[in-house]
């Protein structure tokens, strides 16, 4: 296994900045193209893997998308798939496709760190359900991608192993927390990848890296083996070059899992069939009371998206979501509260980092003090406080009520429209360090994405041209719970319109 | 361990009008095949850390899945305790300890599965059950080095996670208990119910049943006093002793001008005293919140009804039934013992076979201790024996001999055995003659007896029995001798 050296070892690379102008989504084959070519014998899984590995060799030092690249395992898998295909065995809908996984999904025998020192070197004895389903579908897992520590952040600058850089401009962040997964697809290191989205951690980096990113309905995809940040909000979803790829990938991982009690007891929806249906007659919601603070170029792209859908036969409907701006506040109580409990297990007793000290409480303190980064500590303290006796009602309890109000607002809006369009991120990719001094500025990155985590609804980001500095802009398609089909219909239309 | 028979060995009355107020929190491990939230075996006594899995160890990414059988057993217990089964939720109780793998315990908090039940004690005393809720057990820590056996001051500790995630039900009584005897009766009766419904093996010595005692004192009629919780009470006997000690401690403290602090105290069985474990001030803030990894537990009416219908007859009803059939006091030792052993159906079948129910009860209580709920001896054989004794065809001594042989051989015809052994009770005229012979023979003892020395009666009865070679009935002999003295004195 190849462990990329930390960014700090290399400094800035002017060459990669120059290269960024030459990049575009279309320069890399889609999952569907690869699957078709491999199945038809036009290429092999091994050859596809090698072309991705060579791009990793070329640019990973600049990008740092991965915490680990599993070269040997990937080569073994690709070779096995090639021999199976040669023997006429059906290897599944993703046969031979190189796929990267955010490093908070458990992979048996492969280090799974959450980009935290406290889990450095830990190898899970089991696979996450999503990982099992991908392997059964013939995917070739190429490595584990970098993230903000324990998925807490919007820039991947909070990784204990150094930041990931945006392939479009390596002086800028890829977004986060699934920055490594977004960058891996944008840089052609993997044909697709998976991330987790607790408050926008798939959609926002997808927007900033110019790829498709989907946050499915809560409960559509199993969380078994996803290392929890905030259990009631976390959801796994795909990154891809195309909307059709995302539909295929989601079909593979979705569907009930008896190992996750919050998993919806129904099978995966049919999404690929929705892609060609068009949007004629659909009602697209426009949020009239959208929170302010977005870059004008971003808002302009959303306007273009509305126009495109209108031309394709959709109706634009104004909707109000008065509680939207409270989402951020509620989120930053609920998510840290759950995190303070979810992350309490990293105590040095059974696995991961342990810093010995004179007694048990001192050992807990020393281990957690050394193992967690500042942002993680901040959220653990915030969440512990919010749940404390005497403060629960004022903070956590109130936040739960706001969550209910937001869900009700969305439900009311969806009674008049099928999906809602908004910016994914208020800005394009921002330079390193520009928001790290003030956590609240960083938290604002997720103002448009957080509400659908609170409501449990579906949402996705579709790349839709560029904004300031020629950087990618994503348009967010929001849909009600289990509204993946209308969501993908609209996303596919936007892609066609581009 | 029968209720009524447990002599009130250490039940004292508090002085100066003080009254105890006692509430019990009993944890029982449910008798499931697997753990509450994972597929690892729920088995006591295995090699440490062999019944484990990602969920049990709290590995990153592992998620709990509720064990349906555990829910069913908890409902069986709840319904047997006359509780209402309601839609319920799970919470996380957060605290750090090495044997708590996730650093939170999944437990039911403000919406428990079973609420508002009761349990009846002898004398028709009703003890309210506030709730009986599901939760997971912790692992087991063992601390080495140091003097206290506790984690602080030890050199190192080892943790066994086999017990982690074992399903527990916590049964919380209302503060309705007023004496240590009632507390012991409550624990015994609860245990009997647990065994009857098959919810738990309820072994206090193995820790599958654990009792925490809340004790306060007050002047009768006054509001409740400040309570202390006593932990480490590991036997029914200790329940009584700990309560007696703690109530006296509180009374002494208050009477000497002191104030009771709300605290958790540890029962030291060897020393026979409680001491402070932690005060309310340094109690943890558990930061309870709804467990987001689980969903609402809402058993439908059909499920509840089917569990209720499947409940066996409970110990109280079985004691009532046996007492009626045998003409005994339902709170007598024999009734408790025989029902606790599950031999009441057997006694009833002896009666159905034409036997004498009250004699059958005595035989079974005295001679079937190890026979289990279904003794090998055919009920018909026992029935014949009870009738032989009732009709004075054999003496009670002879009946015991026959019974011993039947028990040893797993059955046999009592009539044939009696014949073979030459067992026949003497008829009354023969017995009367025999008594006269002995009176003549034992002049000295007879004189003493007539002189009012009751002890001499035993010697005379013994002499008659010996002369009769055991064919005389002891009771009949005693009655005859008493008659003779009466007429002699007159």
Image (cartoon, grey):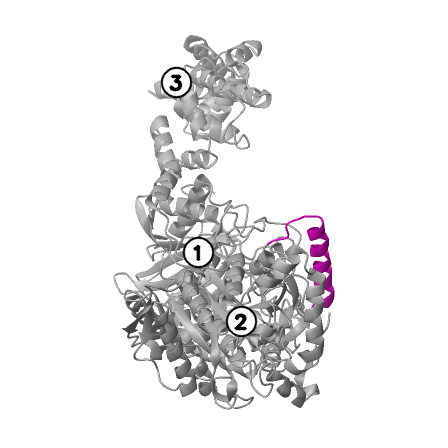
* Secondary-structure class at tag 2: helix
Q: CA distance from mark 2 to mark 1?
A: 27 Å
Task: Look at the picture and state if A351 lies above or below B313.
Answer: below
Q: Nearer the viewer, mark 2 or mark 3?
A: 2
Task: Look at the picture and state if B380 lies above or below B193.
Answer: above
Residue farthest to the left? B221
* Secondary-structure class at tag 1: loop
**Magenta span:** A70-92
Q: Is residue B101 left or right of residue A291?
A: right
Q: Position of residue B269 (x, y in %)?
A: 53, 58
Q: Quadrant of residue A72?
A: bottom right
**Residue at the location (40% across, 42% down)?**
B4
| Dot 3 crowding, Cα within 10 Å, few <14, some 14–19, many 20+ | some
Q: Quadrant of residue B431?
A: top left
Q: Position of residue A242 (x, y in %)?
A: 52, 68
In reply to whether residue A85 is colored magenta, the answer given is yes
Q: Chain of mark 1?
A: A
In reply to whether residue B355 is colored magenta, the answer given is no
| Dot 1 crowding, Cα within 10 Å, few <14, some 14–19, many 20+ | many
Task: Look at the picture and state if A238 lies above or below A175.
Answer: above
Q: Is residue B6 visible?
A: no
Q: Which residue is mark 1?
A: A264
Query: Do callouts 2 and 1 point to residues on the same chain?
Result: yes
Q: Is residue B397 left or right of residue B47?
A: left
Q: Which residue is mark 2?
A: A344
Closer to us: B267 or A134: A134
Q: Position of residue B228 (x, y in %)?
A: 41, 66
| Mark number, residue A485 | none
Q: Which residue is mark 3?
A: B484
Q: CA distance from mark 1 to mark 3?
A: 91 Å
Task: Look at the picture and state if B24 lies above or below A178.
Answer: above
């Amino acid at each position: 296994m190849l462990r990329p050296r930390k960014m700090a070892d290399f400094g800035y690379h002017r060459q990669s900045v120059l290269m960024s102008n030459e990049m575009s989504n279309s320069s890399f084959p889609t999952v569907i193209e690869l699957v078709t070519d491999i199945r038809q014998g036009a290429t092999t899984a091994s050859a596809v893997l090698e072309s991705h590995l060579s791009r990793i060799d070329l640019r990973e030092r600049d990008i740092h998308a991965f915490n680990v690249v599993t070269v040997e395992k990937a080569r073994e898998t690709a070779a096995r798939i090639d021999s199976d295909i040669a023997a006429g065995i059906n290897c599944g809908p993703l046969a031979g496709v190189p796929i990267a996984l955010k490093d908070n999904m458990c992979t048996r025998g492969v280090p799974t760190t959450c980009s935290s020192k406290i889990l450095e070197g830990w190898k899970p004895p089991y696979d996450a359900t999503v990982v099992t389903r991908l392997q059964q579908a013939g995917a070739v897992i190429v490595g584990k991608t970098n993230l903000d520590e324990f998925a807490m952040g919007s820039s991947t600058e909070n990784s204990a192993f150094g930041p990931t850089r945006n392939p479009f401009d390596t002086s800028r962040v890829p977004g986060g927390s699934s920055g490594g997964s977004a960058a891996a697809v944008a840089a052609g290191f993997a044909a697709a990848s998976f991330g987790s989205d607790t408050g926008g951690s798939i959609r926002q980096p997808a927007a900033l890296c110019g790829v498709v990113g989907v946050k499915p309905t809560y409960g559509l995809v199993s969380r078994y083996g996803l290392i929890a940040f905030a259990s009631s909000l976390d959801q796994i979803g795909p990154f891809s070059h195309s909307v059709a790829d995302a539909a295929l990938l989601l079909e593979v991982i979705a569907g009930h899992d008896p190992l996750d009690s919050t998993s919806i007891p129904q099978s995966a929806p049919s999404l690929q069939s929705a892609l060609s249906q068009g949007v004629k007659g659909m009602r697209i919601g426009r949020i009239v009371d959208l929170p302010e603070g977005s870059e004008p170029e971003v808002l302009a792209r959303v306007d273009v998206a509305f126009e495109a859908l209108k031309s394709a036969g959709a109706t634009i409907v104004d909707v109000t979501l008065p509680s939207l701006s409270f989402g951020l506040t509620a989120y930053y109580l609920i998510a840290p509260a759950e995190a303070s409990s979810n992350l309490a297990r990293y105590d040095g007793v059974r696995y991961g980092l342990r810093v010995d000290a004179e007694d048990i409480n001192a050992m807990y303190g020393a281990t957690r003090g050394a193992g967690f980064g500042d942002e993680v500590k901040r959220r653990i303290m915030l969440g512990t406080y919010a749940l404390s006796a005497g403060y629960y009602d004022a903070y956590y309890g109130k936040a739960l009520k706001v969550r209910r109000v937001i869900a009700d607002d969305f439900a009311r809006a969806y009674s008049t429209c099928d999906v809602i369009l908004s910016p994914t991120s208020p800005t394009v990719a921002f330079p390193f360090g520009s928001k790290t001094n003030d956590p609240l500025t960083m938290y604002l990155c997720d103002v448009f994405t957080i509400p659908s985590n609170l409501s449990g609804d579906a949402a996705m980001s579709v790349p839709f041209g560029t904004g300031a500095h020629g950087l990618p802009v994503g348009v967010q398609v929001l849909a009600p719970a289990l509204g993946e089909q209308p969501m993908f219909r609209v996303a596919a239309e936007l892609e066609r319109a581009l | 361990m029968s209720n009524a028979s447990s002599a009130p060995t250490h039940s004292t009355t508090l002085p100066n009008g003080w009254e105890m107020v006692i509430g019990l929190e009993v944890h029982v491990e449910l008798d499931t095949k697997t753990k509450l939230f994972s597929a690892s075996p729920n088995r006591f006594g295995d090699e440490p850390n062999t019944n484990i899995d990602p969920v049990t160890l709290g590995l990153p990414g592992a998620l709990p899945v509720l064990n349906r059988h555990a829910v069913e057993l908890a409902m069986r217990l709840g319904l047997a305790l006359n509780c209402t089964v309601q839609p319920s939720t799970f919470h996380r109780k957060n605290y750090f300890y090495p044997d708590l793998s996730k650093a939170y315990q999944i437990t039911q908090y403000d919406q428990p599965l079973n609420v508002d039940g009761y349990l009846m004690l002898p004398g028709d005393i009703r003890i309210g059950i506030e709730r009986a809720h599901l939760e997971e057990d912790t692992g087991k820590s063992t601390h080495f080095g140091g003097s206290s056996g506790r984690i602080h001051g030890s050199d190192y500790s080892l943790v066994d996670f086999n017990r982690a995630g074992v399903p527990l039900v916590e049964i919380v009584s209302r503060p309705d208990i007023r004496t240590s005897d009632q507390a012991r009766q409550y624990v015994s009766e609860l245990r009997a119910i647990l065994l009857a419904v098959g919810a738990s093996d309820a072994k206090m010595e193995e820790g599958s049943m654990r009792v925490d005692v809340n004790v306060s004192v007050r002047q009768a009629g006054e509001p409740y006093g400040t309570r202390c919780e006593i932990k480490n009470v590991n036997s029914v006997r200790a329940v009584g002793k700990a309560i007696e000690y703690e109530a006296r401690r509180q009374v002494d403290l208050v009477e000497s001008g002191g104030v009771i602090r709300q605290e958790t105290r540890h029962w030291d069985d060897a020393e026979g005293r409680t001491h402070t474990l932690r005060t309310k001030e340094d109690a943890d803030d558990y930061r309870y919140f709804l467990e987001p990894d689980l969903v609402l537990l809402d058993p439908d009416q059909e499920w509840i009804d089917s569990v209720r219908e499947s409940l066996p007859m409970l110990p109280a009803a079985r004691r009532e039934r046996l007492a009626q059939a045998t003409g005994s006091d339902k709170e007598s030792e024999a009734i408790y013992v025989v029902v606790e052993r599950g031999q009441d159906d057997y006694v009833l079948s002896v009666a159905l076979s034409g036997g004498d129910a009250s004699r059958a009860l005595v035989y079974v209580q005295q001679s079937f201790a190890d026979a289990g709920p279904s003794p090998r001896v055919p009920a018909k054989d026992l029935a014949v024996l009870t009738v032989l004794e009732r009709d004075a065809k054999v003496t009670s001594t002879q009946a015991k001999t026959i019974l011993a042989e039947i028990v040893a051989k797993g059955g046999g015809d009592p009539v044939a055995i009696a014949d073979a052994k030459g067992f026949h009770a003497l008829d009354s005229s023969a017995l009367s003659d025999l008594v006269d012979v002995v009176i003549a023979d034992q002049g000295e003892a007879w004189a003493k007896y007539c002189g009012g020395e009751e002890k001499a009666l035993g010697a005379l009865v013994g002499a008659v029995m010996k002369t009769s070679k055991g064919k005389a009935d002891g009771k009949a002999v005693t009655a005859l001798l008493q008659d003779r003295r009466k007429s002699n004195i007159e």
